């Protein structure tokens, strides 16, 4: 997809985070918050231009903030966020981009992988939003008295940038009659467009309060720590015919692997590595082989569980490295789809995933083709203790 323009909404006057100035201009780690946002977007190779939408009284302030960053001439915002976005969309009519990313100026960490996921979804959908699944128990209260526990299974916390094909989101804004819509996806939903959710990022926070400012400053000043976990596993070949499943991909093989689940040794070591990085035990504790629920289970479910635990701790996966050790089957022809499968399960860019293969030079049980071994290393960034 070509012609992607990011609209950065920064016309608000909220001062809860900064006291005497709009939060987007509050200094964070030596630079205004909005400059961090603009710099992250400008660094993405698929974003062709950035259109700021700002308050008309902020033009001089904004010019100083954006100095040295290539942005389009700012558009004056309106009375509401929806009005500001609409003005930005109309200002792009002559450019007629293929797609737009609509991003809050007070979200300073839209990372490359997150933006990639949003843009990739636009190949098949009219719109896509990054979001995180709700992990906390939700309560509905009246006058602080709990009246209901709200099921959280299908609930997500929406983030930005929200991506849309340009003609569809422009039409949705032109047809909007309710200025209270909480985000652009809500307008697209009302217009009948099909949207999808992609994995968000725990670091992609929206700064609202002074506490949020402190949190961002801690991150930028090294308020996170990097942890490493490792995994090792072995599965023997069984009596049945193949294929074998490795890293979520079925690979032709004369014999299948024996194991209580689908015996995917590649994903099993990945799970152990992720759990190890956050000190959460091992795969056997979470999915004991004595429990018939996991007989024949798809190991992708184990990965999803480990990923949720990482996110619940405020963590973000930096990269994973998996090594498969076997004489047969040949892994090389299947490495690329394995890598893509693991990246998809973890919501990572494929460049953050490595899948390698080696042999034992015909030594030991692997050399005798009695089974397959695997090991993995996962690097996870978590809030500093």
Image (cartoon, rainbow, N blue to C red):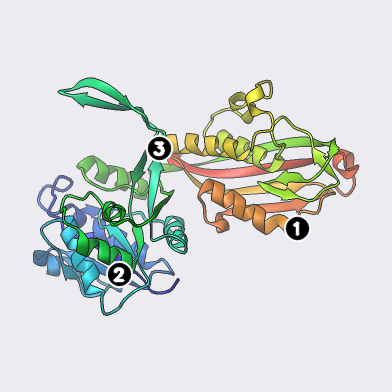
Q: Is residue 82 above or below residue 385?
A: below
Q: Residues within 10 Å of mark 2 (few under 14, many from 20)?
A: many
N-term mark: 2 or 1: 2
Q: Tag 3's secondary structure?
A: loop
Q: Which residue is mark 2?
A: 50
Residue at horizontal 24%, vertical 40%? 211
Q: In the image, residue 383 lies at what x, y percent?
A: 41, 39
Residue at horizontal 33%, vertical 54%? 160
Residue 38 placement, left or right of 125: left
Q: Which residue is mark 3?
A: 154
Question: Looking at the rendering, in which quadrant would you find the C terminus?
Answer: top left
Q: Residues within 10 Å of mark 3 (few under 14, many from 20)?
A: few
N-term mark: 2 or 3: 2
Q: In the image, residue 15 lies at what x, y percent?
A: 13, 49
N-term mark: 1 or 3: 3
Q: In the image, residue 254 lies at what x, y percent?
A: 86, 46
Q: Is residue 186 above or below residue 287?
A: below
Mark-to-mark CA distance, 2 and 3: 33 Å
Q: In the image, residue 102 lies at what x, y percent?
A: 30, 60
Residue 288 placement, left or right of 6: right
Q: Which residue is mark 1?
A: 332
Residue at horizontal 30%, vertical 69%? 50
Q: Tag 2's secondary structure?
A: strand
């Amino acid at each position: 997809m070509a012609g992607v323009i990011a609209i950065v909404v920064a016309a608000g006057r909220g001062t809860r985070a900064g006291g005497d100035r709009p939060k987007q201009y509050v200094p964070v780690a030596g630079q205004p918050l909005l400059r961090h946002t603009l710099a992250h977007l400008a660094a993405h190779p698929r974003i062709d231009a950035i259109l700021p939408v700002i308050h008309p009284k902020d033009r001089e302030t904004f010019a100083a903030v954006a100095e040295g960053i290539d942005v389009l001439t700012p558009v004056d915002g309106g009375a509401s966020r929806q009005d500001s976005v609409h003005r930005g969309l109309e200002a792009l009519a002559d450019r007629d981009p293929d797609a737009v990313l609509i991003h809050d100026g007070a979200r300073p960490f839209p990372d490359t992988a997150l933006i990639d996921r949003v843009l990739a979804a636009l190949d098949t959908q009219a719109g896509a939003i990054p979001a995180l699944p709700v992990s906390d128990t939700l309560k509905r209260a009246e006058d602080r008295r709990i009246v209901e526990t709200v099921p959280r299974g299908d609930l997500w916390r929406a983030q930005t940038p929200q991506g849309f094909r340009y003609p569809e989101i422009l039409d949705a804004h032109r047809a909007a009659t309710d200025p209270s819509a909480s985000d652009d996806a809500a307008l697209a939903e009302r217009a009948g467009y099909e949207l999808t959710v992609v994995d968000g990022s725990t670091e992609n926070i929206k700064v609202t309060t002074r506490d949020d400012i402190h949190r961002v400053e801690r991150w930028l000043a090294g308020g996170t720590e990097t942890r490493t976990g490792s995994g090792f596993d072995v599965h023997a070949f069984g009596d049945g015919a193949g294929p074998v499943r490795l890293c979520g991909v079925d690979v032709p093989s004369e014999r299948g692997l024996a194991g209580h689940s689908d015996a995917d040794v590649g994903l099993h070591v990945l799970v152990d590595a992720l759990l190890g990085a956050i000190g959460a035990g091992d795969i056997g504790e979470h999915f004991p082989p004595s429990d018939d629920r996991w007989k024949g289970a798809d190991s992708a479910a184990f990965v999803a569980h480990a990923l949720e635990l990482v996110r619940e701790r405020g963590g973000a996966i930096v990269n994973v490295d998996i090594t498969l050790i076997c004489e047969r089957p040949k892994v090389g022809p299947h490495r690329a789809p394995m890598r893509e499968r693991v990246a998809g399960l973890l919501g990572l860019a494929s460049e953050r995933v490595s899948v390698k293969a080696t042999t034992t030079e015909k030594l030991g049980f692997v050399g005798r083709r009695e089974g397959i071994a695997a090991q993995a290393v996962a690097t996870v960034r978590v809030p500093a203790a």
